[in-house]
Structures are given as structure tokens and as C-alpha cells.
């Protein structure tokens, strides 16, 4: 008990906590909230008078700003008078604030009752419009017997008319009364306070009744409202798109309810998510570092993926998914106010004009999940680097499932989807966002730091980058395999296959791209899985080059297995690790170069991969343009395993830093091309058809 300092947005008491104290606000202001509605109480306000000692708090009390309250034990109603009578010096302030709180509570109760009346009247309107509206969008007209149980709200009179006028008049004359009446005697002030607190408790009782009515109302009209919400969304889509399907107008309203009603997820999860988004939207400091803001951000994700899963599953059988729902599935959009009007319009336009990648490798998270659900692809690895089947075996080993359950889950579409959403979608969303401590999965205008049309990542942008990087590092996506055909005399020949990776566009505004996995299962010629925010806030080229550097390193580790850092089996990773491990003893490096390596290692916490990625970026951005950035050893290693394309090699042939490296590369590749050329000639001579794969490999070695 005593003085308590509160930071901005700090929660003093939460709904459901046990009532044990009463507080007086001595600095700042405190928000008293219930069911998304709130009243602000300033200096002199008494917190907790509408509660019952020993019961659970009905309201949540949160500091609007840096505030202070003085806390007192609250064991019975009699404690209220003891508290106010022990503060005679501030009794005029307490009296004025108590009267003001009565008026604020009356106004709030009146507004909430008016809203309840509007909701009831809107229900009547909707019931009348429903049959024709349902038919207009091609749906059957249903019966809703629960609507017969809905009664109009009955107004509870908290105070008589003369009492209400009395308190309003007192509030209007606050300054005068503080000087002439409340200050005359603490007993006079205390009398006003006690009467005001009694009035507040009457109002609180009426509010509880109204809250109960709202809950009953929602219980009976929930299904009907859900149906009407979706019908209106489909009708609005038809109007927005016009007769010829062109976008004519964009006016998204009440998107959160449309999404939640469409998803039809668990009622508790739905209501909790609705409440959290309302609270999140109203909190201006939702991205600060306070414990309350962190908890609020974490709470947004608690039910988000349950809603996402439910909406996704329903969309699979719906030929006309509402625009709001599709924006949710593609971009994480949940609320037009949270997203901002202009951003909402842009999201709508981008959703409507979205074109799938003709090659099928650049894909939204929504499209990706459809492939997983339809069993076109295997689920991605989890955070422990286990694929779906390995994860199932782990569950069986730990006793969480039995053999029969494991076999059933292997081909269970819903379980595969659940695994993918829990891992790639949930973890990948956080990873690509770039700032894990402030991550929220919903689209928020606060995170938009670049115009959406500039930040937007689509198939063209990704494919253009793939063309660009292949024009420099032509073998970046190549995997080595072997080919044999004894029937035509080909025992074994090593081939290089260019395997374009999948790029999954995650539904967030973020700053990172990441390699999720380099191959599928144990098949080395399967596409890698890259992830990137669908709205990228950083320099796109830098983000993608960094990603390709990461892929180069991890793919080499996968191909080399346990020998990835064994210098007796030369590879990109083993040679680069050896170079960094023993750079101090390398006589080819100057003191200045060694100092730079030391700095790079320190900056990257001795992570060799991160040092390589930085060097790879310099290699592609600067060295490829004849602007030296690497030392001799680093340049030789990277050029050996990530050689420039033929066009660039020819340009760099006369460059003293690359001349010998290019000659060595050409000589090595000529040695590889010779046996393939002889093999092709021999097959032709014997009258057999030359497999295309041999021509492709010969052409690849010429690059």
C-alpha cells in the first residue's frame, strides 16, 4: 500500500483480478475500461468504487500517461469513508472529481444504451432485407429461430431525473464549488463524495445489466449477423467490380467482423481476437518497450493463426471469397482503421490485380498452403530442422501418439496444414518481419515505412532478380548430380542442374528474406524454399543478394554433409572456414587486411557464414563491376566456387586481380568439357540419339 508510480499504458488492475485495494489518482490520468468501452479519470478520481471487495474486478484500470496513485486496503464498503476522511486537505479535489466521474459514467451509459437500441433497430432492418439480399448473391434463404428470443433493450434508471440534473449542474459549476462549498468543510466535501460514489455504484449496476443484455443479444443474433456480414461483403464485391469485373470503387468497412464471421472459428478465440484488435488499435504506444505493450503485441498472435486456419479452410470450397478475407489471407489485413484508408485501398487494388507466377515458383503464403493441403508438396521443416515425417516419429517416440495415429497423420490433410501453419507461416512471418521483439502478424499502418506500391514484391520483381543474379553468378541455383545410360555406353557423367527455388511471399510488412530450407527431404534436386515479406521495406536487391549468399553456404553444407568444414575435401565452406580460422598465419595477407578480417569476425560474432554473406555481397555488387573490395584469398575462394558468368569473365580477363583466376577456371572447364564432347561424338557415331541432358551439361560448362 502507499504511493504507486505508473508508466504510460501500465495496467494497475485487470478485469478478473481480486479486488483488495482502492486508489486515489494523484498524478496523470487512468482509463477505466470494460468490453472495449472506457472512461478517463483524472487527479482526485477514486478507482475501484464500482467494484465489490473480495470479488473479481469488473473493469480494467490502465494509466493513460505517466501517473501516480495512492493505494489503500479495501476490505469492505465502510473503508471508503475512512479513506476519504483521512485526506481532508484534498477533499475538495476528490469531491469535484467524484462529481465529474458521475457525469462521465452517466454519459457513457446513455451512449451505450443508445448503441444497444441502434443494434436492435438494425437487426429489424436486416431481417427485412435478408431474403432479397441472399437471393441477389445466389444463396438460399435460411431460418434463424434464435431471433425470436431477442427483446428490445430496457433502460435502467440509475438516477432519478432530479439527481441527474443535480450532478450535471454541480459539474458545470466545478470551479466555483471547489472554492465556496467543497472547501468550506471537509465534512461537506465528504458528503458530496459519498453521495457521488453511491451514484457511481448505481450506474455500475445498470452497466452490468446492459453488458449482460449485450451478451445475450450477441448469443441469439450471432449466426444471423455472420450470415448477413458475408452476404453484404459478397454484394459489396459485386458492386465494386461492376458488370465487367473491373474495379469501380473501393470502400472496405467493418472488415474485422467480416473476416471473423467468415472464419467461423472457436467462439472464445473469435471474441478474444476481436477484443485484442480493438485494444491494440486504440493503444497509440503499441510498439514501445513497456511490459504492457509487449504483452499486448504477443496477445495479438495468440488466436491469429486459429482464425487464419479457419478462414483458409472455408475459402477452399468458396468460389467467391470476400475481398476482406482474401486481403487477410494474402497480406495479414484485419481492420481498415488499423491499416489506414489509403493503405486499405492499395491492398484491395493489389489483391484484385494479383497475377500468379506463370512458372509457379513465386507464390503467396495462401497459395503455398493450398499446395500443402492438396498434397502437391510436402510440409516444410520445423524449427528443429525436422521434416513432417521425422516430426511424427519424434512424437511417437516421446509417447504423444501411437503407431496407428502416426500412420493416419502422414496423409491427413488437416494435420499437414496445421504443421505448415505452425512452422513456416507462424515462424516465417516473425523471421521476415525483421524485428522479432515488436512483431505482430496483422497489417498495421505503423509498420509501413515505404509506399506500398514500391515495397510490394510480386512474381515479376523476383523473376527479374533471378535473371539479374544468374547474369553474374550463373551457377547460384545449380545442383550437381550424376547421369548414366549403359544402353548407349554412358557409365556415369556428372551434371549440373539449375533448380529455381520457391519464393513464398509472407503476409506482412517486413525487412528480411530468409532461407527456410535448401532441399525437400533428402532429394538434392528439389527446389529450395525462400521466404520474404510481401511488402519489403529494405533495399530489395541487397535483401535478395544476402539471401542468395546464405543459400550458397547452406547448400554447400548440405552437399558436403559431415565434411562441410573438412579442408581435405575442398569446398566453398571448408576453404572459407580454413581461411577465417588461420588468417593470422596467412603470409599472403597484409596487416591491414588481417585487421579487417578481425573486425568482420567481431562484427558477426565469429559466425563464419555471416562473414561469407557480407563478402558475397561485395563480390556481386562491386567486384563484378571491377571495383575491388575483397582480399586475394577471399576473392580466389569465392570465384572458384561462385564463378562469374562468361560475359563478365571476358571483361575481367585483363584485370590483374582476376586474370589468373579466369585462366584457371577456363582450363578447368575445358578439361570437364572434353570427355563430354567425346561422349557425344561417340554416341552419334554409333547411330544412337544423344540425350538432351548431355547437350545441356556441355552448354552449361561453356557459360
Image (spheres, rainbow, N blue to C red):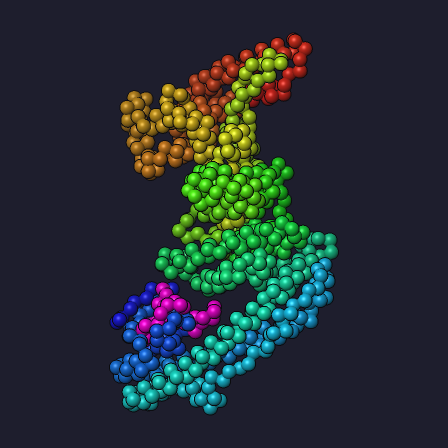
Specify the quadrant of the image occupied by residue 205: bottom left
Residue 202 image position (x, y, % from top left): 43, 82
Residue 649 is left or right of residue 100, and the answer is right
Specify the quadrant of the image occupied by residue 252: bottom right
Residue 51 is left or right of residue 145, and the answer is left
Residue depicted at x 47% and y 76%: 208
Residue 43 image position (x, y, % from top left): 34, 75
**Residue 137 vertical position relative to residue 186 in the rendered view, above or below:** above
Residue 628 is left or right of residue 596, and the answer is right
Q: For residue 678, say whether it is visible.
A: yes
Q: For residue 544, say whether it is visible.
A: no
Residue 15 sits inside the magenta stretch: yes
Residue depicted at x 38% and y 71%: 56
Residue 363 image position (x, y, % from top left): 57, 42
**Residue 416 vertical position relative to residue 662 in the rendered view, above or below:** below
Q: Nearer the viewer, residue 236 or 321?
A: 321
What is the magenta range?
10-39
Residue 665 image position (x, y, % from top left): 47, 18
**Residue 469 vertical position relative to residue 21 in the rendered view, above or below:** above
Residue 502 sits inside the magenta stretch: no
Q: Nearer the viewer, residue 683 or 253?
A: 683
Q: Identify the image quadrant of the N terminus.
A: bottom left
Amino acid at each position: 500500500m502507499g504511493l504507486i508510480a505508473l508508466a504510460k499504458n501500465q495496467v494497475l488492475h485487470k478485469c478478473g483480478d481480486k479486488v483488495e485495494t482502492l486508489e486515489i489518482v494523484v498524478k496523470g490520468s487512468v482509463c477505466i475500461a470494460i468490453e472495449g468501452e472506457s472512461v478517463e479519470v483524472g487527479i482526485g478520481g477514486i478507482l475501484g468504487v464500482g467494484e465489490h471487495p473480495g470479488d473479481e474486478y469488473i473493469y480494467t484500470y490502465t494509466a493513460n500517461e505517466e501517473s501516480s496513485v495512492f493505494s489503500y486496503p479495501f476490505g469492505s464498503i465502510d473503508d471508503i469513508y475512512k479513506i476519504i476522511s483521512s485526506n481532508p486537505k484534498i477533499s475538495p479535489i476528490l469531491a469535484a472529481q467524484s462529481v465529474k466521474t458521475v457525469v462521465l459514467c452517466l454519459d457513457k451509459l446513455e451512449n451505450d444504451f443508445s448503441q444497444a437500441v441502434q443494434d436492435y433497430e438494425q437487426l429489424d432492418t436486416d431481417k427485412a432485407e435478408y431474403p432479397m439480399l441472399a437471393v441477389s448473391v445466389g444463396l438460399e434463404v435460411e431460418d434463424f429461430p434464435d431471433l425470436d428470443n431477442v427483446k428490445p433493450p430496457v433502460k435502467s434508471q440509475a438516477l432519478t431525473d432530479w439527481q441527474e440534473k443535480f450532478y450535471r449542474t454541480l459539474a458545470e459549476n466545478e470551479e466555483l464549488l471547489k472554492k465556496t462549498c467543497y472547501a468550506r468543510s471537509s465534512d461537506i466535501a465528504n458528503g458530496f463524495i459519498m453521495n457521488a460514489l453511491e451514484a457511481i455504484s448505481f450506474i455500475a449496476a445498470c452497466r452490468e445489466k446492459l453488458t449482460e443484455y449485450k451478451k445475450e443479444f450477441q448469443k441469439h443474433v450471432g449466426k444471423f449477423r455472420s450470415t448477413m456480414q458475408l452476404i453484404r461483403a459478397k454484394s459489396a464485391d459485386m458492386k465494386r467490380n461492376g458488370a465487367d469485373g473491373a474495379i469501380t470503387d473501393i470502400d472496405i468497412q467493418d472488415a474485422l467482423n467480416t473476416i471473423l464471421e467468415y472464419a467461423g472459428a472457436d467462439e472464445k478465440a473469435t471474441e478474444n481476437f476481436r477484443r485484442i484488435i480493438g485494444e491494440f488499435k486504440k493503444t497509440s504506444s503499441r510498439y514501445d518497450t513497456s511490459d504492457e505493450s509487449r504483452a499486448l503485441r504477443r496477445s495479438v498472435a495468440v488466436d491469429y493463426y486459429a482464425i487464419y486456419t479457419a478462414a483458409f479452410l472455408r475459402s477452399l470450397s468458396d468460389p467467391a471469397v470476400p475481398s476482406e478475407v482474401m486481403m487477410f489471407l494474402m497480406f495479414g489485413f484485419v481492420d481498415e482503421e488499423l491499416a489506414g484508408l489509403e493503405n486499405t485501398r492499395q491492398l484491395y487494388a493489389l489483391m484484385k490485380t494479383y497475377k500468379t507466377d506463370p512458372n509457379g515458383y513465386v507464390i503467396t503464403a495462401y497459395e503455398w498452403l493450398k499446395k500443402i493441403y492438396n498434397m502437391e508438396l510436402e510440409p516444410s521443416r520445423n524449427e528443429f530442422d525436422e521434416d513432417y515425417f521425422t516430426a511424427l516419429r519424434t512424437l511417437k517416440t516421446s509417447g504423444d501418439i501411437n503407431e496407428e495415429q502416426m500412420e493416419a497423420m502422414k496423409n491427413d490433410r488437416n494435420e499437414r496444414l496445421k504443421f505448415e501453419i505452425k512452422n513456416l507461416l507462424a515462424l516465417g512471418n516473425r523471421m521476415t518481419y525483421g524485428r522479432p521483439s515488436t512483431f505482430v502478424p496483422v497489417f498495421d499502418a505503423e509498420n509501413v515505412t515505404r509506399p506500398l506500391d514500391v515495397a510490394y514484391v510480386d512474381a515479376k520483381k523476383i523473376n527479374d532478380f533471378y535473371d539479374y543474379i544468374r547474369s553474374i553468378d550463373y551457377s547460384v541455383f545449380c545442383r550437381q548430380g550424376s547421369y548414366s545410360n549403359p544402353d548407349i555406353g554412358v557409365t556415369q557423367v556428372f551434371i549440373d542442374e539449375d533448380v529455381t527455388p520457391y519464393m513464398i511471399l509472407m503476409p506482412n510488412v517486413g525487412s528480411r528474406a530468409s532461407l527456410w530450407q535448401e532441399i525437400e527431404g533428402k532429394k538434392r534436386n528439389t527446389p529450395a524454399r525462400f521466404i520474404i515479406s510481401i511488402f519489403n521495406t529494405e533495399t530489395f536487391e541487397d535483401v535478395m543478394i544476402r539471401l542468395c549468399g546464405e543459400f550458397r553456404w547452406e547448400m554447400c553444407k548440405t552437399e558436403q554433409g559431415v565434411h562441410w568444414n573438412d579442408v581435405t575435401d575442398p569446398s566453398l565452406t571448408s576453404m572459407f572456414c580454413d581461411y577465417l580460422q588461420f588468417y593470422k598465419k596467412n603470409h599472403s595477407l597484409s596487416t591491414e587486411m588481417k585487421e579487417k578480417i578481425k573486425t568482420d569476425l567481431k562484427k558477426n560474432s565469429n559466425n563464419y557464414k555471416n562473414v561469407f554473406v557480407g563478402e558475397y555481397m561485395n563480390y556481386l555488387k562491386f567486384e563484378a563491376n571491377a571495383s575491388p573490395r575483397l582480399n586475394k584469398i577471399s576473392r580466389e575462394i569465392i570465384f572458384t566456387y561462385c564463378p562469374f558468368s562468361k560475359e563478365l569473365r571476358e571483361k575481367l580477363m585483363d584485370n590483374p586481380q582476376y586474370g589468373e583466376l579466369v585462366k584457371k577456371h577456363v582450363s578447368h572447364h575445358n578439361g570437364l568439357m572434353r570427355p563430354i564432347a567425346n561422349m557425344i561424338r561417340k554416341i552419334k557415331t554409333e547411330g544412337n540419339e544423344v540425350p538432351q541432358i548431355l547437350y545441356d551439361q556441355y552448354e552449361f560448362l561453356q557459360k
